Image (cartoon, rainbow, N blue to C red):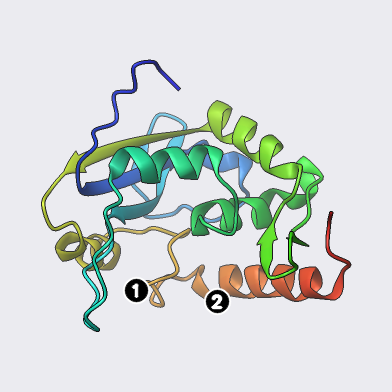
């Protein structure tokens, strides 16, 4: 990542482009730029809870940074990418720590490196990003988004791939 980071410490929407041919997923209808396709959008923070809990204080800087350098437990994007790239990167979803969290263990570093070489992100600041999220997902072809995206032709394939990886992980010993 660049230093200082150009990412704002503000609320907003972010969109991930990937060198899509490397993922082996259908991208017909996706927004493209060169050899990259827009495959995923997200927001930060999430919508304020309706149950009286405090709203998230997360911002674009924190969320995008976590997608690049975090783990699959805290990033649905990393979970999806890791499942799609598990054979190519020789990584596997596993239980870690107390056994209640799922990550790619040491493979998270390989996933971060892959993202650094094959992905880029754009963003737009806005005060209430949750008001845009459903609209973007319902109008754009975004095969890596699952939430609000059951109309996507790739939805069931991706949901099944992730479900199978999770089931396998729960059947394996916990990584120490």
In the picture, the quarter occupied by the C terminus is bottom right
Position in image of residue 109 (x %, y %): 68, 36
Q: Residue at x 65, y 40 (%)?
A: 111
Label 2 Cα neighbours within 10 Å, binned few <14 / some 14-19 / many ≥20: few
Q: Is residue 115 shown above or below 57?
A: above
Which is more toward the observer, 148 or 20?
A: 148
- For this view, does 18 lie left or right of residue 30? right
Q: Residue at x 48, y 58 (%)?
A: 144
Q: Quadrant of residue 175?
A: bottom right
Spatial CA span between label 2 and label 1: 13 Å
Q: Residue at x 19, y 65 (%)?
A: 135
Position in image of residue 20 (x %, y %): 53, 42
> Residue 111 bears which disc, if any?
none
Viewer-nearest of discs 2 and 1: 1
- The residue positioned farthest toward the top in the image shown: 3
Q: Is residue 6 shown above or below 38?
A: above
- For this view, does 15 lie left or right of residue 94? left
In the picture, the quarter occupied by the N terminus is top left
> Residue 156 bears which disc, if any?
2
Label 1 Cα neighbours within 10 Å, binned few <14 / some 14-19 / many ≥20: few
> Residue 148 bears which disc, if any?
1
- The residue positioned farthest toward the right in the image shown: 173
Q: Is tag 2's residue or tag 1's residue first in the polypeptide sequence?
A: 1
Q: Is residue 32 shown above or below 30?
A: above
- For this view, does 25 lie left or right of residue 170? left
Q: Residue at x 61, y 47 (%)?
A: 23
Q: Secondary structure at mark 1?
A: loop
Q: Is residue 122 shown above or below 13?
A: above
Q: Secondary structure at mark 2?
A: helix
Which is more toward the observer, 53 or 18?
A: 53
């Amino acid at each position: 990542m660049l230093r200082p980071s150009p990412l704002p410490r503000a609320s907003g929407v972010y969109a991930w482009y990937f060198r899509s041919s490397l993922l082996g997923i259908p991208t017909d209808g996706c927004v493209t730029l060169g050899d990259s396709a827009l495959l995923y959008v997200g927001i930060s923070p999430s919508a304020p809870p309706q149950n009286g809990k405090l709203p998230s204080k997360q911002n674009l800087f924190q969320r995008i940074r976590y997608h690049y350098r975090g783990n699959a437990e805290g990033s649905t994007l990393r979970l999806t990418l890791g499942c799609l790239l598990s054979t190519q990167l020789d990584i596997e979803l596993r239980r870690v720590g107390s056994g209640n969290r799922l990550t790619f263990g040491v493979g998270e570093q390989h996933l971060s490196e892959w993202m650094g070489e094959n992905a880029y992100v754009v963003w737009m600041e806005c005060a209430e990003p949750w008001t845009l999220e459903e609209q973007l997902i319902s109008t754009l072809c975004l095969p890596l988004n699952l939430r609000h995206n059951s109309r996507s032709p790739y939805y069931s394939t991706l949901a099944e791939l992730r479900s199978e990886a999770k089931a396998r992980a729960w059947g394996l010993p916990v990584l120490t």
